[in-house]
């Protein structure tokens, strides 16, 4: 909008100002990007865990809601065996993941 106005008014100084402003915005974006890279390196292991856990658990909850939508018998037809298969698979995967959190030792050989 500002650029079109400057072009229509044939205002060279205004155009130069806008171009400089755009360059400054690009430089600011680069600086913010670099700061994010460096601060990410300063992130503690627990901070990283919390950040990723929040995103991943919320995504999983959304996907579980979508699976729950399959229970709508107006839209879907399913057998009790199919439902058991779904829940057995989900429960087994949850147990596997829970087990990973409970076992903190490594599987490395040690004398």
Image (cartoon, rainbow, N blue to C red):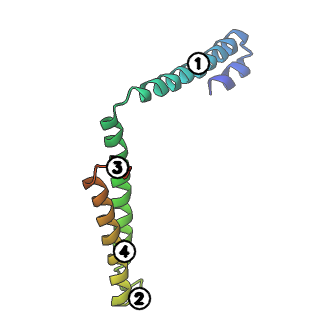
Of 13 and 69, nearer the camera is 69
Mark before the other along the chain sequence, 1 or 4 = 1
Of 56 and 6, nearer the camera is 56
Mark 4–mark 2 Cα distance, whole angstroms, equals 19 Å
Q: Residues within 10 Å of mark 4 (few under 14, many from 20)?
A: few
Per the image, the residue denoted by label 1 is: 27
Q: Depth-wise, is mark 3 or mark 2 nearer the camera?
A: 3
User: In the image as oriented, which residue stretches furthest toward the top?
Assistant: 13
x 33%, y 48%: residue: 53
Reply above or below: 34 against 104.
above
Mark before the other along the chain sequence, 4 or 3 = 4
What element does badge 2 sit on? loop
Mark 1–mark 2 Cα distance, whole angstroms, equals 56 Å
Q: Depth-wise, is mark 3 or mark 1 nearer the camera?
A: 3
Q: Is residue 94 left or right of residue 22?
A: left
Per the image, the residue denoted by label 3 is: 106
Per the image, the residue denoted by label 4 is: 89
Q: Which mark is residue 77?
A: 2
Mark before the other along the chain sequence, 4 or 2 = 2
What element does badge 1 sit on? helix
Reply above or below: 103 against 79.
above
Q: Depth-wise, is mark 1 or mark 4 nearer the camera?
A: 4
Mark 3–mark 1 Cα distance, whole angstroms, equals 46 Å
Mark 1–mark 4 Cα distance, whole angstroms, equals 50 Å
Picture quadrant where residue 19 is located:
top right
Q: Is residue 63 left or right of residue 29?
A: left
């Amino acid at each position: 909008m500002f650029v079109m106005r400057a072009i229509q008014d044939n205002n060279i100084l205004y155009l130069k100002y806008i171009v400089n402003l755009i360059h400054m915005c690009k430089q600011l974006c680069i600086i913010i990007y670099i700061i994010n890279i460096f601060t990410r390196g300063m992130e503690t292991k627990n901070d990283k865990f919390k950040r990723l856990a929040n995103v991943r658990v919320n995504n999983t909850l959304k996907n579980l809601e979508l699976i729950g939508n399959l229970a709508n018998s107006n839209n879907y037809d399913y057998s009790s065996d199919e439902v058991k298969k779904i829940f057995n698979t989900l429960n087994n995967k949850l147990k596997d993941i829970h087990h990973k959190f409970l076992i903190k030792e490594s599987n490395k050989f040690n004398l």
